[in-house]
Image (cartoon, grey):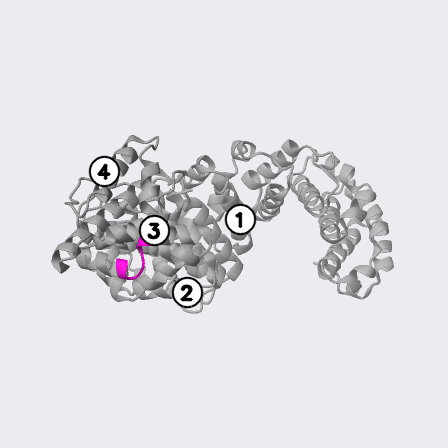
């Protein structure tokens, strides 16, 4: 409680009160000073009215008080000053005084001192301040594990600051300090939302440091209280922080499925909320993408079965490119699954949304769209036909010849898949759209073996379909063979005949024989016509599966 008359005092008058022989008078003056320092944060005019150098010197003296309340309030004021005037605080010799308080017999004094030091460190560029990170972590850990709710809050804030400091403790030290379980415990108390926020932030940071600390956070039972916070909270910053934590808990390498799968139906429900914050939407889409990009059919099935696919397709047209990209990435991951899973997103309108994404000014979005189209082209005949019927193939071929290299490459793969897996009529359509030249561009000696295999299968398919066209139309030569030669394909294949990979050499030499023949039988074992099976290692792909 602050005495009402203190609000009317000037700063010099407040400082005079700080010299009072009465402890209660000093404590109340410190609380009023702390209030003003907080209000002055970010306001240049207000800070100018406060003589930081003079106040810092007085606070250092009070920090050494034998009265616990006085020392605590002085540490609070120094932390508030450090947020705006860190250099002044350091020059006033505050850090050594705070460091002495790390050995105080009172836990709340130690925690307040640690928080003040962390605040100074995060706001200054003067190095490590001569304070042991081990001693800071020990105090903070004690505050989180043993303190009452008010001490836990300050300790959690200090931990957040400590983890942001470049010279902060390594993650093994934080884990060994035993803070994970207490942080998870405070997530269960909705009566302390500020502490929940700090705990969620710290746990998100810990989980983001790699699979081992992430799995420890999961094993501590974080998922249930975290999902409850996500479901119940209306505060934007709490939602953003909890979403960040959830994303870090789900990221690759894949955590145990049973520990993270409860998040899918909750996110699937929340993501349908209208007028949701853009950052929160992006985080939810990113979390779902971790299930579909590297997961097997079970993980992809969890996303599909949650009923979220329609909403994801809607978000592919969101105003934010960040939301678009992660929604598109999730949908693209679903197309890596079974034909049935792919069909679900197709029936939700994914193909029209993918076509629109090909025209995006954002390079990442065009690239993600091409990945998804690549996978759909490897699906059933009807799924490939849906891509063709959408009218996007000419646009895809255009991208494969004119876009930036990273997007161009993936568009080439999509064309390759369409040819390698397509029916007679589908391949003829793709050839009519100008796909032969781009396909031959894939035949580069330094390309990945998996891509070369796919390209050679597609070239073989072209020769096979071209032979059928030759017979059907009574042509003297295989017309597609001529197109391959005009695109410099034969020379490129001849170079691959000496490739280091044995499979590439065999396929290339077989194709050279077919190209040299004048319209002979092109039925070889390098590819099969219009197959709907997913068996080859080049037939489904995500962005993370290639370099």
User: Residue, x 27% and y 58% (percent of image)?
Assistant: 431
Ranked by sequence position, the earlier of labels 4 and 1 is 1
Q: Is residue 491 above or below residue 393?
A: above
The answer to whether the residue labelled 3 contacts the one labelled 2, judged by CB atoms less than 8 Å apart, is: no
Looking at the rendered structure, which numbered label has been put on residue 359? Answer: 2
Real-space Cα separation, disc 4 to disc 2, in angstroms = 39 Å
In the rendered structure, which disc, 3 or 1, sits on the residue that comes first in sequence? 1
Identity of the residue drawn at 82% across and 43% down? 91
Q: Callout 2 environment at 10 Å: few (<14), some (14 to 19), or many (20+)?
A: some
Quadrant of the rendering where the N terminus is positioned = bottom right
Badge number at residue 510: 4
Q: Pick whichever of labels 4 and 2 is earlier in the sequence.
A: 2
Q: Nearer the viewer, residue 184 or 320?
A: 320
Measure the C-alpha gap from mark 3 to mark 1.
56 Å
Q: Is residue 343 left or right of residue 10?
A: left
| Mark toward the start of the polypeptide (2 vs 1) | 1
């Amino acid at each position: 409680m602050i005495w009402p008359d203190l609000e009317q005092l000037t700063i010099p008058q407040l400082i005079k009160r700080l010299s009072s022989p009465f402890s209660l008078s000093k404590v109340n003056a410190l609380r009023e000073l702390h209030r003003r320092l907080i209000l002055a944060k970010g306001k240049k005019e207000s800070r100018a009215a406060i003589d930081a150098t003079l106040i810092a010197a007085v606070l250092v003296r009070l920090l050494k008080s034998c009265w616990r309340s006085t020392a605590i309030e002085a540490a609070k004021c120094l932390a508030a000053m450090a947020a705006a005037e860190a250099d002044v605080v350091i020059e006033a010799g505050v850090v050594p005084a705070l460091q002495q308080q790390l050995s105080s017999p009172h836990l709340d004094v130690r925690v307040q001192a640690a928080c003040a030091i962390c605040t100074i460190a995060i706001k200054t560029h003067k190095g490590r301040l001569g304070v042991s990170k081990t001693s800071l972590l020990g105090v903070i850990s004690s505050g989180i594990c043993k303190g009452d709710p008010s001490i836990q809050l300050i300790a959690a804030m200090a931990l957040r600051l400590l983890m942001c400091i470049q010279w902060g403790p390594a993650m093994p030290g934080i884990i060994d300090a035993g803070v994970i379980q207490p942080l998870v415990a405070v997530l269960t108390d909705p009566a302390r939302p500020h502490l929940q926020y700090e705990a969620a932030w710290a746990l998100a940071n810990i989980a983001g440091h790699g699979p081992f600390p992430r799995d420890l956070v999961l094993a501590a039972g974080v998922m249930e209280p975290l999902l409850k916070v996500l479901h119940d909270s209306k505060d934007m910053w709490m939602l953003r922080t909890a979403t960040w934590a959830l994303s870090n808990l789900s990221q690759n390498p894949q955590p145990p499925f049973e520990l993270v799968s409860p998040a899918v139906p909750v996110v699937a429900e929340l993501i349908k909320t209208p007028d949701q914050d853009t950052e929160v939407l992006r985080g939810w889409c990113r979390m779902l993408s971790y299930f579909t990009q590297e997961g097997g059919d079970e993980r992809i099935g969890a996303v599909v079965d949650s009923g979220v696919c329609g909403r994801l397709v809607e978000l592919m047209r969101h105003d934010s490119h960040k939301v678009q990209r992660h929604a598109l990435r999730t949908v693209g991951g679903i197309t890596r699954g079974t034909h049935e899973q792919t069909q679900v997103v197709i029936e939700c309108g994914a193909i029209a949304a993918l076509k629109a994404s090909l025209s995006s000014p954002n390079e990442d979005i065009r690239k993600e769209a091409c990945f998804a189209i690549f996978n759909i082209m490897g699906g059933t005949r009807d799924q490939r036909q849906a891509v063709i019927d959408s009218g996007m193939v000419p646009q895809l071929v255009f991208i494969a010849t004119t876009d930036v290299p990273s997007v161009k490459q993936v568009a080439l793969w999509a064309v390759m898949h369409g040819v390698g897996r397509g029916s007679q009529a589908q391949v003829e359509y793709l050839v009519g759209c100008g796909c032969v030249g781009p396909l031959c561009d894939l035949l580069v000696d330094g390309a990945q073996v998996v891509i070369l295999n796919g390209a050679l299968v597609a070239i073989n398919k072209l020769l096979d379909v071209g032979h059928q066209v030759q017979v059907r139309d009574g042509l003297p030569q295989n017309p597609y063979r001529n197109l391959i030669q005009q695109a410099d394909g034969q020379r490129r294949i001849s170079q691959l005949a000496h490739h280091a990979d044995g499979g590439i050499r065999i396929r290339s030499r077989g194709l050279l024989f077919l190209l040299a023949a004048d319209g002979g039988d092109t039925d070889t074992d390098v590819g099969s016509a219009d197959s709907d099976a997913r068996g080859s290692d080049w037939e489904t792909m995500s962005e993370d599966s290639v370099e």
